[in-house]
Image (tube, helix red, strand yellow):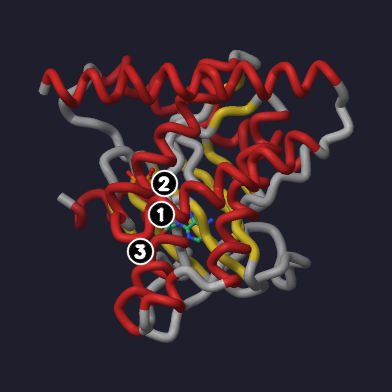
């Protein structure tokens, strides 16, 4: 199946070298060394780019499938463009082919000493495997978690909701976190939607980094609160923050009830 999808992608991207780096439920992600317009791009990482391709889904009606692929690709590309406009750390959008479900973007991050890509998840796992307990909760880890909280706060202050916040969807580059994967992202000023975003992250940290999850989640929330409190937006944004935290308690309670009921 993957071979067929790679062939399809190659047919839309002739002469572009493509190396598969991930295949998820929604898309296949390639790495390439080629920029579509420019031989010397003035981007931070000059030689590696990402191409995300949403292949047709054989179980959907072809017309519905084509329309969903196009609208999701447009949605993700627009979200990336708005992130850039709002100065929220994320990959730069380079090009897109909406009908074919293709987004070409800047590749972020590098490799950890064990060769894994530098997502927050891989980095925390690497620390767990190769270091003693104190390294896993060091000042550096605390600093990164706080930065992640600040990043999420900036997103929410722009009334943008990621929709799939996990430690895999945060890439570390030069000690700074960046968001990726906007396939489920949306726009909302509602406290409930922002609280759900925070809750998804909290649960992801708990299930992926269970030993230190309490500390990581505490630092992330601290960073979130700090950024919102110091935003200088005054009483309105403080009230919005209080609403979001209240909703977060509700969402947690609903989550606990659901897991008790099975
Ligand atoms: N801009 C980027 N820079 C670096 N790596 C990236 C970038 N975009 C995607 N990746 C890598 O590709 C993987 C999959 O990308 P993404 O999450 O956007 O696709 P997806 O199909 O939605 O994946 P999933 O279904 O697993 O959530 C990421 O976890 C990351 O390792």
The residue carrying mark 3 has its beta carbon less than 8 Å from ligand 1: yes
Label 3: few (<14), some (14–19) or many (≥20) C-alpha neighbours in 10 Å: few
Which mark is drawn over residue 15?
none
Q: Quadrant of the C terminus?
A: top left
Residue 161 in percent (x, y) is at: 56, 28
Residue 69 in percent (x, y) is at: 40, 28
Above-or-below relation of 190 to 173: above
State the SS at label 2: loop
Above-or-below relation of 82 to 126: above
The residue that label 2 is drawn on is 166
Please identify the quarter of the rendering in which residue 250 is found: top left
Which mark is drawn over residue 168?
1
The residue carrying mark 2 has its beta carbon less than 8 Å from ligand 1: yes
Q: Which of labels 3 and 2 is toward the front?
A: 2
What is the distance, in whole Å, between disc 3 and disc 2 at their CAs? 18 Å
Residue 144 in percent (x, y) is at: 59, 62
Question: In the rendered structure, which disc, 3 or 2, sits on the residue that comes first in sequence?
Answer: 3
Please identify the quarter of the rendering in which residue 55 is found: top left
**Residue at left offset 59%, top offset 51%:** 148
The residue that label 3 is drawn on is 21
**Residue at left offset 36%, top offset 82%:** 132
């Amino acid at each position: 199946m993957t071979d067929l999808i790679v062939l399809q992608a190659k047919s839309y991207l002739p002469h572009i070298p493509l190396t598969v780096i991930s295949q998820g439920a929604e898309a296949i992600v390639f790495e390439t060394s080629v920029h579509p317009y420019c031989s010397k791009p003035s981007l931070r990482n000059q030689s590696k780019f990402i191409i995300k391709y949403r292949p047709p889904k054989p179980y959907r009606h072809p017309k519905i499938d084509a329309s969903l692929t196009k609208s999701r690709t447009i949605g993700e590309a627009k979200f990336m463009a708005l992130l850039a406009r709002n100065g929220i750390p994320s990959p730069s959008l380079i090009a897109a082919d909406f009908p074919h479900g293709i987004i070409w973007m800047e590749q972020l991050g590098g490799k950890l000493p064990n060769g894994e890509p530098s997502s927050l998840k891989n980095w925390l796992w690497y620390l767990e495997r190769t270091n003693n307990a104190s390294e896993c909760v060091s000042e550096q880890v605390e600093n990164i978690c706080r930065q992640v909280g600040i990043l999420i706060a900036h997103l929410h202050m722009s009334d943008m909701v990621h929709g799939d916040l996990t430690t895999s969807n945060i890439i570390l580059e030069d000690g700074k976190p960046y968001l990726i994967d906007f396939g489920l992202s949306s726009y909302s000023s509602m406290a409930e939607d922002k609280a759900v975003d925070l809750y998804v992250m909290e649960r992801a940290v708990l299930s992926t980094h269970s030993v230190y999850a309490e500390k990581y989640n505490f630092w992330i929330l601290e960073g979130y609160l700090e950024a919102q409190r110091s935003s200088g937006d005054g009483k309105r944004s403080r009230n919005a923050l209080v609403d979001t935290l209240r909703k977060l308690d509700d969402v947690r309670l609903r989550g606990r009830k659901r897991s008790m009921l099975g």
